[in-house]
Image (cartoon, rainbow, N blue to C red):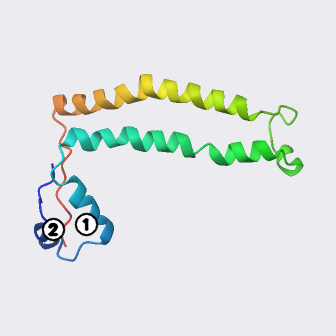
Amino acid sequence: MLEYLNLEDAEAAVGRKLTFWEELWLNYSAKKHDFILHFHNILFLFLFYSLAPLPYMWIELIQSKKINKYKIQPKVQRTFSDMFKCYKDVMKTFILVAGPLQILSYLTTKWIGIRTSLPLPSR
């Protein structure tokens, strides 16, 4: 949990008015437990693994001759169903491995005694 539970305390600690995004995050996270905030990593990773392959998929699906000359195997063409099956396999692995690993990493961090709460920077 954050040290500053209200906007005035956080602004006084920083010595300036918080930006819109800082204020939004403070209002969202001030009273949430660290485990819930750590759990957000799973959501960020899920979003990353869902969005990062989209440019590659688009390039592969348009099958441009200009792009094919840079491919390692230019004669191999992937279909949308191939790509979607790969995505499903990656998400299944993510849910079964990366999700539990994120939860265990939080518990391990607390068990070892690593401090995760940081004060706001002072000027």
- Left or right for 88, reference 32: right
- Left or right for 41, reference 16: right
The image position of residue 28, as x and y in percent, is 24, 55
As helix, strand or loop, the secondary structure at mark 2 comes to helix
100 in relation to 12, above or below: above
In this rendered view, identify the residue nearer to me: 85 or 68: 85
Residue occupying image coordinates x 18% and y 70%: 14
Point out the tag, 1 or 2, that comes first from the N-terminus: 2
Mark carried by residue 7 = 2
Label 1 sits on residue = 23
- Alpha-carbon neighbours of circle 2 within 10 Å: few (<14), some, or many (≥20)? some
The image position of residue 91, as x and y in percent, is 52, 30
Q: How many marks?
A: 2
Q: Amino acid at mark 2?
A: Leu
Confirm or deny contact between disc 1 and disc 2 (CB under 8 A): yes
Residue 68: quarter of image: top right
